[in-house]
Image: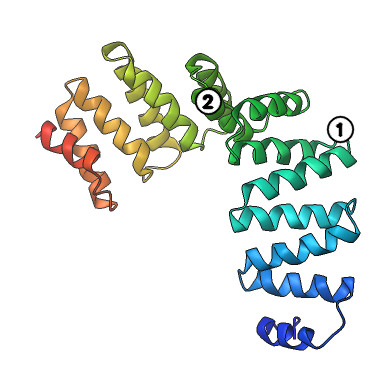
Amino acid sequence: ALQQYRYKEALLLLENEPETAENLLLKAESLEKLYNYADALTVYERLLQNNPDDTELLISAAECASQAGDTESALKNWIKADSLSPGNLFFQTKKAMAYYRNGNWQETIESAQTVFQSDSIPLLLRMTGDAFLNLNDPIEAGYCYSKAYEKNPSDHLSLSRICEFYYALGEIGYDTVVVMTEKYLNEINPNQKSIGQFNGMANYSSGNFDKAIERLEANIALGDSSYTTTYFLGMSN
């Protein structure tokens, strides 16, 4: 049934079978394929009661918990997996990201610093920037965002954070926002709405109203009907 993607049928068949580890794994797999991550997580937790040091189970449970929105359980399982395999970059990275998703900002930074000794992962750099920002440290946050964007120029979220910083500086920051956003729109993705919005805002604030109108109208054509875009388009006109 599983091989033929008949997951509901597989679950019905398993209801009448002994609750062996193998059958429970099949049940968890079926539940995940049906996007029932909460119930699948319950199955993984039952399996972990008898095999608390099974790394594969911990990974499956952590990933499933993340899909279910249970950030605490995901974090708990990544911490356990990391403790069983010290120095494993994969577990270190996953643990740092789990701290982030659980809102543990200081722990995110500390765990990320361990990862950065071996590898500068752009996504984790951005998350670390967010953690610094949540701890009211915009200088360190800006450094992390800049490094993340440097390593992955297509990372529009990091670029957006950088643009927020420079735009907030006022007149001395507008030109930087214009240059960075135009480079992204011309070389990476002309249809990225958040970057297009920043470009329009910065052009408006610099007095380049025609350019602002052109960019913001392009954003609206892409389906951006946000307050910010329509406000700055109105002001530019």
Which residue sits at x=70%, y=24%?
Answer: 110
Q: Identify the residue at the far left of this view.
A: 237
Choose top left, top right, bottom left or bottom right for residue 29: bottom right
**Residue 12 at x, y = what percent?**
72, 87
Name above or below for residue 63 compared with residue 228: below
Q: Is residue 137 above or below residue 15?
A: above
- What's the residue at 33%, 14% (across, down)? 169
Mark whose residue sits in front, 1 or 2: 1
Q: For mark 2, what is the residue?
A: 145
Q: Quick check: 141 above or below 44?
A: above
- Say what secondary structure mark 2 lies in: helix
Q: Is residue 201 left or right of residue 188?
A: left
Q: Which comes sooner in the sequence, label 1 or label 2?
A: 1
Classify residue 106 by image quadrant.
Answer: top right
* Residue 35 visible in the snapshot: yes
Kind of residue at badge 2: Tyr
Quarter of the rendering containing residue 196: top left
- Which residue is the extreme one toward the top? 172
Q: Nearer the viewer, residue 5 or 44?
A: 44
Determine which residue is flagged by label 1. Answer: 87
Residue 151 visible in the picture = no
